[in-house]
Each structure stands twice: as structure tokens, then as C-alpha cells.
Amino acid sequence: MKLFVFSLFYICREVIRFFHKNFLTLDQNLLAEWLVEIAKKEGYIIKMLEYNFVNALTLVELNKKFLNYETDTDILTFDYSKDNQITAESFISREALEENAKDFSQSVENETLRLISHALLHCAGYKDKDEAEKSLMRNKEDEYIEMFHVKH
């Protein structure tokens, strides 16, 4: 059993990466394990997943360049997934994440979990364009945040 757990962490480090400058306080191995579990529950496997924690200006520029939006956002995910294999890269605004945490009376850690799971859920086919989709997405995020805290 220990060999399997070691292999899982080794595989996670190879396919799930977090890029940040002293921002992410959650254990990256635990996050990777959690993301693999979410993907499995949703019927997917993770081939490659990158999370980039950037400043708000970078996210605005990406939004303009790739989506032709002139607005800021908290997260932008580029989904290259095929079939049930998730391949994606996400960009998360550190400033927006911290502001969301304040606005919704959440810890920065919980808001980080929300945005990380949000990106993965988009890759698993969840949308958030209308109120019904947003509600389902929020319920899934809450479920997986709770799962992270119960397991870790």
C-alpha cells in the first residue's frame, strides 16, 4: 500500500504543477492528491494540470488577448482536454482571490480551494453562465472543499 501512495504522489508532481511566488500556503502534495480524487469522482483522469498564481494585470491582459474581454476576473482556464483526460492550464489572480475571500467571509485557503476546484470542474464539463449552472458549480465546489478538509 505504501508503494501505491508513493507512486500517486510521484505521478501527481509530474502532472499537476503550481506556479507562484510565495503565495500558495496549502501543501501542494495534498492539493494534487485532492485534485486527482475530484477528477476520479467526476469520471476523469488528469494528464496535465497547471495552476499559475499571477497578478491581476496579467489576468486582465490574458482576458483581452484570448477572450477579447476588457474586464478583470479571478480565474481563467484554458482547457485542452480530450475524452476523459484533463489537460489544462489555469491563471488565478492573487488579488482577486484575496478580495473574494474578504467579500465572502472565507479564508484565503478556502478561496484558493474554491478556485482550484472551479478550474477542474470546468474541465469536467461544468458551466457557470446562468444561475442554475452557477448554483450547481458552487455546490460542487463546496462539496470538494469539504472533502479536502475531511481528508486532510
Image (cartoon, rainbow, N blue to C red):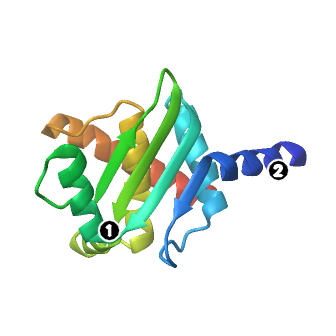
Relative depth, front residue between 15 and 27: 15
Quadrant assignment, res 106? bottom left
Residue depicted at x 32% and y 71%: 55
Residue that extends furthest to the top in the rendered view of this protein: 83
Q: Which residue is mark 1?
A: 97
| Helix, strand or loop at mark 2 | helix
Quadrant assignment, res 129? top left
Asked if residue 135 is positioned above or below residue 40 in the image, the reply reads: below
Q: CA distance from mark 2 to mark 1?
A: 31 Å
Q: Quadrant of the N terminus?
A: top right
| Helix, strand or loop at mark 1 | helix
Asked if residue 40 is positioned above or below residue 96 in the image, the reply reads: above
Q: Which residue is mark 2?
A: 6
Expressed as whole percent of the image width and height from the top left, the position of residue 141 reads 38, 48
Q: Is residue 152 visible?
A: no
Residue that extends furthest to the bottom in the rendered view of this protein: 22
Relative depth, front residue between 108 and 80: 80
Which kind of residue does numbered mark 2 sit on? Answer: Phe
Expressed as whole percent of the image width and height from the top left, the position of residue 140 reads 38, 42
Mark 2 or mark 1, which has the lower sequence index? Answer: 2
Q: Quadrant of the C terminus?
A: bottom right
Residue depicted at x 59% and y 50%: 16
Which kind of residue does numbered mark 1 sit on? Answer: Leu
Expressed as whole percent of the image width and height from the top left, the position of residue 71 reads 12, 58
Relative depth, front residue between 15 and 39: 15
Residue depicted at x 22% and y 36%: 133
Quadrant assignment, res 150? bottom right
The image's mark for residue 61 is none
